[in-house]
Amino acid sequence: MPPRRPAAPPDARLAVPVLLLIVFVSLIGFGVVIPLLPFYAHVFDATPWQVTLMFSTFSAGQFVGELTWGRLSDRIGRRPVLLITIAASALGYVALAFSPNIWVAILVRALAGFFSGNISTIQGYIVDVTPPERLAGRLGLIGGAFGIGFVVGPWLGGVLARPEMGAAGFHPPLLVSAGLCVVATVGVMAFVRESVSEKGAHLARTGPLAALAQAWTDPVLRRLVAMTFMGFASFSAMWSVLGLWGAARFGWGPMEIGYVMGATGVAAALSQSFFSGMLVRRVGGVATIVAGLSVTSVALLIQAASPWVWLCIAAVTVAVTGHTLTQPATSALISEAAPQGRQGAILGANNAAGSAARVIGPVVAGMLFSSVGGWAPIVFAGVGIVPAAWLAWRAGRQLRLRGAG
């Protein structure tokens, strides 16, 4: 049954902070395990490719989730989708905390990824309740919540974990994350009102792959989705081995990895919350994306080559800043180019492309780390960002041609 048309426009002042909390909790789920990965390998006697598989399966689940939840939220409404996915995420944290071996942990991560694939639903809500002139800024707030999640997630994983206790040492950060999901669920119930109209729900009755097919027929959307795929495939290669790389190269433990990721999270939050919207207003979305990706590529290559720990940390921070800077601009361009009533589905298709990329990137990174060396996945990431920047430039050229027409 389609959702009822809201009696009055939802109050974004109340809903947006709750939505940001949901994004924050989702990113905790991604970041909390990064400092733990070397110790999952030790406790469960797992190989590097099995550890990076925890990234890939989470992202595979997100791929399916983004295709499912974004489309479903266009049809039945944003609010019920948010309630379902956040409550299930809480259960996923608990299940991961009590996983008895690496294969159960991998399966749990796949299911957790599926229910974390609700970012397009949140983006769709923001599009529903935000005037066009404020859209990039509010989408930038979502990126800021991503960054803060990267601060708190690794901090929770690194500071609260007790590796010396074996698998039981992973319980505290994961159970705290489950508690935050419960808080977010209560926030949705109390403050988030439905934003989807009956007309929008009627237009969205299509299959889960229809949004990807529709995006691929549009020359602007096709290039932007391909850019997202290339960018995330490359960048996730670096993320998936960061804990292993830091432990192998500098002897970092969970706390050191958590602090490094905390620093990058602060930079990411600032870049998206304050700088992304400003850059989009001044130079445009396409220029913001191309500049951000170019900076990211150079910083990753510096990270791979530098022998000094301080320069590596600085390079990682700059790379994260450049990459996250592009995401609000990409979402704003896609929502602008998407057909009316299909924003949630098209944003879901783009997020699904990013999730699919995060399946491939860690698999390649794990193989390179094991067979070539710790530096190889970082170089792969830096080089792979270049075609993503080129695709963004091509999308901008197509937009100019469309405007001229």
Image (tube, rainbow, N blue to C red):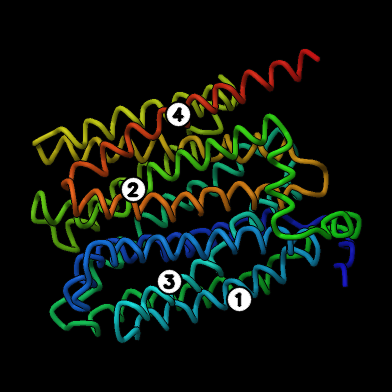
Q: Nearer the viewer, residue 165 or 160?
A: 165
In space, the residues marked 4 and 2 are separated at their CA atoms by 15 Å
Q: Name the residue under label 3.
A: 109
Query: SS for tag 1?
Result: helix
Extreme-front residue of the structure: 371
Q: Please name the residue shown 57% across and 62% down the image.
A: 117
Q: Compute the Cα span from label 4 to label 1.
A: 43 Å
| Residue 219 x, y percent position in the rendering | 69, 30
Which tag is nearer the camera, tag 4 or tag 1?
4
Residue 237 numbered mark, or none: 2
Q: Quadrant of the N terminus?
A: bottom right
Label 1 sits on residue: 186
Asked if the residues shown at circle 4 and circle 1 are in contact, with their CB atoms under 8 angstroms apart, the answer is no
Three-letter amino acid code at disc 3?
Answer: Arg
- Which residue is identified by label 4? 387
Amino acid identity at mark 2: Ala
In the rendered image, residue 300, in percent from the top left (x then y), is placed at 28, 35
Indicate the amino acid at tag 4: Pro
* Number of residues whose C-alpha sits closer than 10 Å to that of mark 2, classed few (under 14), some (14–19) or many (20 or more): many
Whole-percent x and y of residue 53? 35, 64
Point out the tag, 1 or 2, that comes first from the N-terminus.
Answer: 1
Q: Is mark 4 on a helix, strand or loop?
A: helix
Mark 4 or 3, closer to the camera: 4
Query: Which residue type does callout 1 highlight?
Result: Val
Q: Are marks 2 and 3 in contact (CB under 8 Å)?
A: no
Q: Residue at x 14, y 62 (%)?
A: 253
From the viewer's perspective, is 156 left or right of 287?
left
